[in-house]
Image (spheres, rainbow, N blue to C red):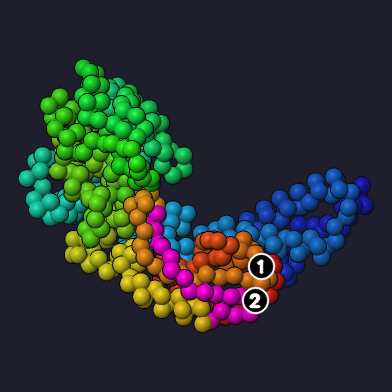
Amino acid sequence: MSNLFRHIPAVDKILMDPEITEASRGIPSLEVTSVVRQFLDELRGEIAVQKVACTKEEIIARLVLELKATKRRKFQPVVNATGVLLHTNLGRAPLPELAIERLQSLGQGYFNLELDLNTGERGSRYASVSRLFNLLLAGEQGQVEKSTNSTCDTVVVNNNAGAVLVALKALTAGQEVIVSRGQLVEIGGGFRVPEVMATSGCHLKEVGTTNRTRLSDYAGAVTEQTKAILLVHPSNYSMIGFTESVPRDKLAQLAGERGLLLIEDIGSGAFHPFEEPLVSSALRHSHIVTYSGDKLFGGPQAGIISGRKDLVDIIKKDPLLRALRIDKLSLIALEAVLELHLGKAYNKLPLWALASVDPEEIRLRAETWQSHVGPGLKGEVVQAESTMGGGSLPGETISSWALALQSSKLSSAELAEWLRRNDPPVMGRIVQDRVLLDPRTVLPSQDQLITSLLQGGVASCS
């Protein structure tokens, strides 16, 4: 058996090999050593089972591939040609240039995260973004004082699931919260509304059926232990057919009559220029509204809680808020995005800019890509539908065009892999055995990357 292992070089010898040195460029030396050791351990196991030796050349070749795979596991730019604007796997909303500039200028040094420069005393990390959110909401409602929430405030946490969790814990722990069975949704990553509610300490009380819930169902479920009604927006699905749900204003009326809170998880949560589900519309009736910062708002990951000031004050005092508080870098980016919204500079928000591109411009870009298709590739410009994605605007699409790619040398799955293994990786989607590349979700500055890749063509299956 020992003879089978004699061709395995020592770790230090492998690390000095020129091919390994080149393949490991950009990877920390300790990480390279770890990859090599782990590979050799697995190789010895293979040899022990298969009773077949491995040459040094084979070992080096396999290690080069392993090191390349290691690089692909690290964060890196990706060309999103999927047609999904808020692609969860690709980081959802791209940040505007202003946010990047702020991150660079403030993130590389110290800044007044929790310091009130006017008094010299400790301040709140939420103060600036809360004030800007309140201004934005007041502007959209034409004065928030005219709504049922006479005084509005906002606090921010790390994501919307956290926002729902801390709001329920602070306001309803130990008491009943009524939810329609049709709204007990599961969001990305396997997190389910009933589980979030259980973690908050409130008691879930289901009413209605999966497809039909009436006002009488809510009214009949209210007891002395009931604290709130939870309204959950179907952000990542839509129901059609024999369905019935209760309008927000009717639930608000019931909540007012019974002395209950109306808490609403609006999910993606839109602001102008996007249309419903508008946060400002929800706040005209709901006491507390939670929504995401990295979806239709076009900012970084964040969970935002807006609503009646006295209720937000209670949430701010809950110990869980600190555990779920938003990171300083996300706050920096969020403040910049808020300023763009307040200035109505929507064209500077990449999400809105991409969503609003005229389909004719998309078609022309796809045709330009098609003109650069190289050997082994065949491309056709076809009509397509882009989607918002990220659990936003389910069932709605945006008219677009795409380059449909095929190859005589590669299957559609192999072609998608070839695109993905490019530097930078290009992500498309497979439709009817063709790989579609949708320019709507490709930044204009990345068009040259696409055309250069296509021009080179494909030689064979990798």
Residues 73 and 273: in front is 273
Placement of 249 over or under 130, stated as above or below: above
Residues 445 and 390: in front is 390
Q: Quadrant of residue 322?
A: top left
Placement of 7 over or under 226, stated as above or below: below
In the image, residue 422 lies in the stretch drawn in magenta: no
Residue under the point 41% across and 75% down:
363
To which residue does mark 2 refer? 376
In the image, residue 380 lies in the stretch drawn in magenta: yes
Tag 1 near tag 2, CB within 8 Å: yes
Specify the amino acid type for callout 1.
Leu
Which residue ends up furthest to the bottom in the rendered image? 371
Residue under the point 17% across and 29% down:
255
Q: Quadrant of the C terminus?
A: bottom right
Q: Quadrant of residue 150?
A: top left
Range of magenta residues: 372-389
Tell me if I can see residue 122 in this picture: no
Residues 439 and 315: in front is 439
- Tell whether 420 sits left or right of 408: left
- Tell whether 290 sits left or right of 146: right
User: Going from the N terminus, do you reach mark 1 or mark 2 first?
Assistant: 2
Residue 410 badge:
1
Specify the amino acid type for callout 2.
Gly
Residue under the point 63% across and 56% down:
30
Q: Position of residue 105 (x, y in %)?
A: 33, 65
Q: Secondary structure at mark 2?
A: loop
Q: Main secondary structure of the magenta part?
A: strand
